[in-house]
Amino acid sequence: MKKLEEYVRSIPDFPEPGIIFRDITSVLQDPDGLHLAIDTMQDLIKDVEFDVVAGPESRGFIFGTPIAYLNNKAFVLIRKKGKLPCETVSQDYDLEYGKATIEMHKDSIKPGQKVLIVDDLIATGGTTEAMIKLVESLGGKVVGVVVLMELAGLKGRERLKDCPLYSAITYEGK
């Protein structure tokens, strides 16, 4: 059986020279790779107690929904500004070249709920930090973040402070 890392396609010099882009589409396109990714992420959080799973569009949806399903939990969408139809709360955050805003439905997290955030990747941690603030603004408590890949060289883990981060694959570089 292949290791999970073997399903990830590495593309050198994308989007710019010196960067190795870690492409997860190759994981998703292989039934064994997808199965291994979900099983590995599920195993990482098997001892985490949570009430609800939250994930950002679009790749957080891909990995978060099966994790919610396997644990008989609800899945909450975190979306880009203007994509949700009901009353929302929002959180702004900085991007490399600008700003972005994410939103959740105001009624998606109840005060005191323990929330597991699921995403494909953590790099600098800006998006993840914004998701944590968003959940906390609704009275939820983020009890962990699980990702398929961590780019450790970008130090995103440091932005999460006391929130546990579980990574299926860790790449030391950027």
Image: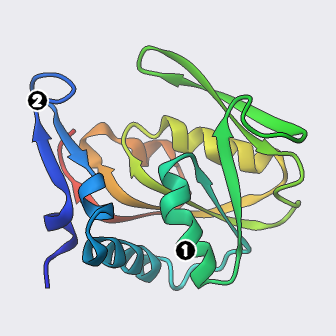
Q: Residues within 10 Å of mark 2 (few under 14, many from 20)?
A: few
> How is the structure coloured here?
rainbow
Alpha-carbon distance for marks 2 and 1? 33 Å
Q: Nearer the viewer, residue 86 or 130?
A: 86
Residue 15: image tag = none
Q: What residue is disc 2 on?
A: 13
Tell me where residue 139 appears, x and y as whole percent. 84, 54
At 39% across and 81% down in the image, what residue appears?
39
Judge the density around disc 1: few (<14), some (14-19), many (≥20) Cα neighbours within 10 Å.
many
Of callouts 2 and 1, the N-terminal one = 2
Q: Quadrant of the N terminus?
A: bottom left
Q: Secondary structure at mark 2?
A: loop
Q: Residue at x 13, y 41 (%)?
A: 11
Q: Quadrant of residue 32?
A: bottom left
Looking at the picture, how far across and down is residue 110, in whole percent? 87, 61
Q: Considering the image in quadrants, where does the C terminus appear? A: top left
Please tell me how many numbered marks the rendered image carries: 2
Residues 150 and 38: in front is 38
Please state which amino acid type lies under the numbered disc 2: Asp
| SS for callout 1 | helix
What residue do we see at 42% from left, 83% from top?
43
Identify the amino acid type marked 1: Ile
Q: Looking at the rendered structure, which numbered label has been put on residue 67?
A: 1
| Residue 63 seen in the current view | yes
On screen, 66 above or below 139?
A: below
Question: What's the residue at 84%, 65% (across, down)?
Answer: 112
